[in-house]
Image: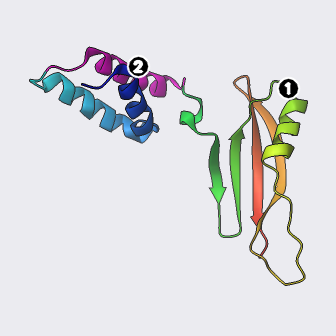
Amino acid sequence: MKTLEEWREIQKRSIRWPRDLKVAYVMLEAMKDSKQSINRDAVVTLKQRIREITKGIVDEFDSKERILVEDCDYYVSKIALKAKSREEAEEEFRREHYIEPYHSWYDCTGKPFTRSHKVVKQRGKWFAVHHVSFDM
């Protein structure tokens, strides 16, 4: 029988997005209908995970970066930052996420570079909207 921590880890990996809720409910029904003894903690953690996702408690569904728009030569992403102020958020973005352009003697390198970014605060947390283009 799996430990509570093992069940939590399995559920965090397998139930991350709203589309996975259907799978979670099927798992829950299977546990209820099963004739075998089921770990009660597993059922409780599964129900908690469902509630977290449906109530939006899980920040961006455990994702640090989320692609908002993409095309063949650019994409726009939203990046969760750990900063507590706008200045810290700007510094964190520059330090960890800014992509310098790569200058080459040759025509097109295909390398990504930061075209622009904007630091925003949503629901009390700092995010960066990052516009990345490709040298084409």
Residue 66: x %, y % from top left: 62, 46
**Residue at image location 74% in from the left, 74% down from the top:** 110
The kind of residue on which mark 2 rests is Gln
Image: magenta residue range: 37-57
The kind of residue on which mark 1 rests is Ser
Secondary structure category for the residue under label 2 = helix
| Residue closer to the observer: 40 or 15 | 40
**Which label was assigned to residue 48?**
2
| Residue closer to the observer: 1 or 74 | 1
Secondary structure category for the residue under label 1 = loop
Residue 102: x %, y % from top left: 85, 68
- Dividing the picture into quarters, in which one does residue 38 lie? top left
Relative to 109, residue 122 above or below:
above
Q: Are marks 1 and 2 in contact (CB under 8 Å)?
A: no
Q: Residue furthest left?
A: 35
What's the distance in space between the residues labelled 1 and 2, CA to CA?
A: 31 Å
Relative to 77, residue 3 above or below:
above
Residue picked out by circle 1:
85
- Whichever of callouts 1 and 2 sits on the residue coming sooner in the sequence is 2
**Residue at image location 87% in from the left, 31% down from the top:** 88
